[in-house]
Amino acid sequence: MKDLKKSRKQVLTDLTALDEVLSWFNQLEQPSIPKKVWLQCQLALAEGFTNAVRHAHKNLSPDVPIDLEVTLFPEHLEICIWDQGQPFDLEQHLQKLDRLVDEQAGGGRGIAILQKIADKISYTRTNNNRNCLLIVKRYQEI
């Protein structure tokens, strides 16, 4: 399957980099992607990035980079966010999610938001001791 466009970005572990991340992402917007889907993906990227900063890199130096990649395909897009934190069992967390989400809390809903937005999410440990959060969102039927 041929991708239409692929872009990579690296930022430091800093929540203030979110504006830079979103600006980079918005430069990739294509007319073939419905606006609602694009905004959902923007939110998913923001949630994934802030989770990497707040949780995965919580005890790491702010100089440790977070790598981002967006690939646009004819019918879907993929967002990959690589962190260097400790492994995390996303599947186990998703199974417990309904009991954990506090609707009144100021935070802690990022994974629940990702699960609602994405058609697929995964979080896997790579061979180079990094973790990859993969977010897939379809915008056209196959």
Image (cartoon, rainbow, N blue to C red):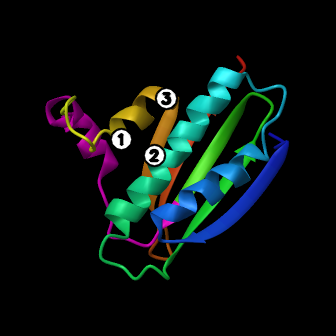
Instruction: Find numbered disc 1 in the image and state the secondary structure of the residue it sits on.
Output: helix
Which amino acid lies under the numbered mark 1 shown in the image of this protein? Ile
User: Quarter of the image containing the C terminus?
Assistant: top right
Marks 3 & 1, CB-CB < 8 Å contact? no
x, y percentage for residue 79?
61, 47
User: Most extreme residue toward the left, as rendered?
Assistant: 99
Dot 2 or dot 1, earlier in sequence = 2
Is 32 on the left or on the right of 46, as rendered? right
Provide the residue span drawn in magenta: 82-101
Marks 2 & 1, CB-CB < 8 Å contact? yes
Q: Is residue 1 above or below residue 80?
A: above
User: Quarter of the image containing the N terminus?
Assistant: top right
Q: Which mark, residue 111?
A: 1
Which amino acid lies under the numbered mark 2 shown in the image of this protein? Glu
Q: Is residue 103 above or below residue 89?
A: above
Q: Which mark, residue 47?
A: 2
Residue on which disc 3 sits: 117
